[in-house]
Image (spheres, rainbow, N blue to C red):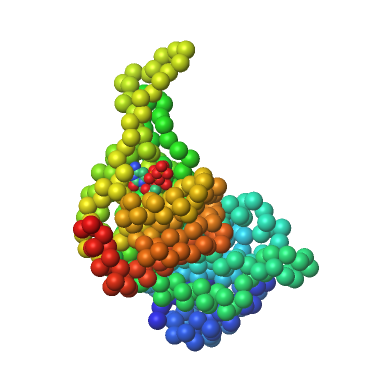
Amino acid sequence: MANIVLGVTGCIAAYKAPLILRELQKKGHEIQVVMTRHAAEFVGPITFEALSGKRIWMDMFGHPTSGGVEHINLARQAELFLVAPATANVVAKFANGLADDFLTAVQLSVTCPVVVAPAMNVEMWRHPATQQNLERLKQRGVHVVYPEAGYLACGDVGEGRLAEVEAIVEAVQVIVQQSTSLAGKQFVVTAGPTCEDIDPIRFVTNRSSGKMGYAIACQAALRGATVVLISGPTRLEPPPGVRLEEVRTAKEMHQQVNAFFVDADVLIMAAAVGDYSVDAHSQKIKRQKSLTLDLKSTEDILAALPRRKGQIVVGFAAESEALEENARIKLQQKKLDLIVANDLASFGSNFDCALLLRADGSKSQLEKMPKVELAGRILDEVEKLMRTPAQQFKVEERTEG
Ligand code: CTP
């Protein structure tokens, strides 16, 4: 199966790492263990050496054969990097790109999927710094296997206990199997708001954060797709392995979507494209008693999309009222295969409570979940559509009509 690098960091839950190693081996994976110095205070390297049958990596220096680049060699071979348990300190280092020991140097060098299973005291877990660090990791596409609530080694009761070994192994299995499920497929994903300049310093835009589109692009790349992310201005870091095309206006987004859609298998329009543009003034508009802007309607990118057989198109619907009714109209008018409908509360939030409406008339109301998870659910739907030959016929039929 996969070459997995198992990173073990220093906390009491390190005693579960040998069990994780064993279970992963039973699934047929090759395991290479990397430890921090603190982890070795809890479980001796010899335990991992005996179980994995391989030497254990802990220090950056002192390996006579490696020439100091062994972390790069390991990172290149890794098909998945799992850190279990991951302490608050190591999560913070990952989030900030620090590489001051062997394990964090590997983390910074890998291009494969990364899974972290945090374990720590409840107060450390709840600390805003830890939560923000995890959020940053998730935005970069790192998978988090959340800790459970229960009795902790320090005597406290609460969240922070390492997830069950089975849950961690299951997460790894899903990712290893997923990482090729979209191999060979070309995805175009749009994200963020668009901006229309009024004058050199003022513009019209909307509150879209881009989180949904970035999460979809990231997850699609993790499943092996080739992804172009066409994004309006956001504060987000581009997901690893994704080609980012930055745009500003609705017109620029339209041009880029048309250019990349020609060769695409799937288009997911998560962008909040502005519905109006303005003729920008070349000079700063001076203060006056009142100002009237002449807003002109932009073209509907989805509705105007030139299609060919078999391409799958997913749209979003942001509604403040009559969610299902309005979303269904958009599904039909824009000739979509799937529409993800949500109310405006999801704007800027890390969570979403989406209603999925399909072209065949069926629907699924999803529970409130992190956008990263919703991204996975949307891709599951796309994969289902790809496996349905009838769907391809339907797309062709609707295009011609
Ligand atoms: N969309 C598009 N081109 C536009 C506007 C929107 O392709 N000019 C896409 C969005 O990316 C989204 C879907 O159409 O996938 C629905 O966008 P939404 O803003 O909810 O609806 P609109 O079509 O703009 O209609 P309204 O604002 O009247 O609800």
Location of the C terminus (image quadrant): bottom left
Q: Residue at x 34, y 57 (%)?
A: 336
Report x, y in % for residue 116: 54, 66
Query: Which residue is farthest right?
Result: 155
Report x, y in % for residue 181: 36, 72
> In this rendering, does residue 75 appear at all?
no
Q: How many marks?
A: 0
**Residue nearer the viewer, 101 or 332:** 332
**In this image, 122 relative to 392: left or right?**
right
In this picture, is 27 found above or below 64? below
**In this image, 385 relative to 209: left or right?**
left
In this picture, is 193 found above or below 37? above
In this picture, is 395 found above or below 260? below
Location of the N terminus (image quadrant): bottom left
> In this rendering, does residue 50 appear at all?
yes
- Ligand 1 resides in the quarter of the picture at top left
In which image quadrant can residue 335 be found?
bottom left
Report x, y in % for residue 14: 62, 74
Q: Residue at x 69, y 68 (%)?
A: 149
Report x, y in % for residue 198: 37, 26
Query: Which residue is farthest top?
Result: 289
Q: Residue at x 28, y 44 (%)?
A: 254
**Residue nearer the viewer, 303 or 313:** 303
Q: Residue at x 34, y 61 (%)?
A: 337
